[in-house]
Amino acid sequence: MKSVFDFGLNDWELWCSERGLPRFSAKQIFQWIFQKGGKDPAQFTSLSLKIRQALAEEFNWKLLEIDSHLISRDESEKVLLRTADDLLIEMVIMPYDNRVTLCLSSQVGCKRGCTFCQTGRMGLKRNLTSGEILGQLLIANELLLPKDRTVTNVVFMGMGEPLDNYDEVVKACRIMLDENGFGLSSKRVTISTSGIVPRIAQLGRELPVRLAISLHSADNEKRSQMMPVNRLYNLEALKKVLIEYPAPHRLGITFEYVMIEGVNDRKEDARRLIEFLHGIKARVNLIPINHFPGVEMHPSSAKRLQDFQTELTNCSIPAPVRYSRGVDISGGCGQLAAKREGELHLDPRVLHRERRRSVLNVL
């Protein structure tokens, strides 16, 4: 049975057309689901009883199941979600004074294998559907309802490489931006990528969202060691597509740069980064690496951070230091690996091997 959350407005228009229903019914259904967060068609009172019955009979209305819910000392919330086929993903809700940002996942795991990211140690299980992506936003808004708040900003910085799941991510984003859907501003939806060059070019043509590049080094040899994707799409190819990318001039492109002691944090590294960014309207977020089991890398010292930042700001490149939210619950940048509270200390490869063994024992 199809998930109702996988249907966009065009899908509903086709569904209504096939049943001889008026076109405006499609917009009403779409609004009930995404604008109003409806999960029970019996309550869609603006629709006829016939339509409500058809919706109930033909579609699966179940959202992702909440497996566990951890709250950080900084009030960030990490929510572990279970899919219909018993896989686990994570999202992180980060409340601020003037906004609520949702960091959501686009895949179960990730195949890119970046050395500083725990998700990559899981490997890739599968892509998420657009409905599973949007389900995270619907669940987050439900959790925020008692606080009289809703998600205002969405960042595709959770589990997975969004551009490896391009079609479903774009479909989900269109519903986020649609005034009859979630109605989010295009300035408040950010897709982060490790640098899938052909998809970056395609995204620039098709979707007006903000772009973030997970860069971490402006040296090809070093970046290839840290991020295997660089062996497919090197820095020269990446820069070419970014210069041509239609980013809003005022906002430009955000670059994420994880700061690792003795690896990519020297002044020489900063100067290479400045050279790479020449000709690009850029903002660089400097992110001290977050610890996770099995990693032997350490965050840059305060002096290294300051010296690196100074090199960039002296060249008029904004470079704020971003300390991750939710680090104590393994919810920070690079820490997501579908872990429950008692599993935060485990290497993800060990954890997921044990889970597979448990499943086999049950069978």
Image (cartoon, grey):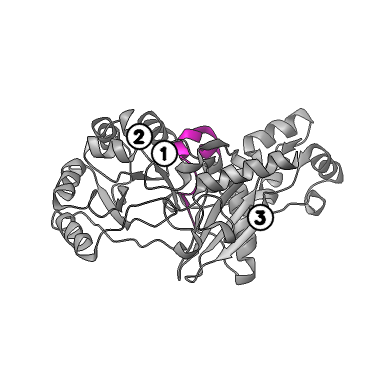
The image shows residue 103, relative to residue 303, as above or below, that is: above
Residue that carries the numbered disc 1 in the rendered image = 113
> Mark 3: which amino acid?
Asp
Left or right of 330: which side holds 306?
left
Q: Secondary structure at mark 3?
A: strand
**Which sits earlier in the primary sequence, circle 1 or circle 3?**
3
* Rendered view: 224 above or below 118: above
Asked if the residues shown at circle 3 and circle 2 are in contact, with their CB atoms under 8 angstroms apart, the answer is no
Q: Is residue 48 above or below residue 346?
A: above
**Does the rendering let one see residue 86?**
no
Q: Secondary structure at mark 2?
A: helix
Q: Around disc 2, counting alpha carbons within 10 Å, would you say few (fewer than 14), some (14 to 19), or many (20 or more)?
A: some
Magenta stretch: includes residue 141: no
Q: Which residues are magenta?
A: 153-171
- Mark 3, residue position: 67
Residue denoted by label 2: 228
Q: Which mark is residue 202?
A: none
Label 3: few (<14), some or many (≥20) within 10 Å?
Answer: some
Query: Mark 1, residues whose alpha carbon is within 10 Å: few (<14), some, or many (≥20)?
Result: some
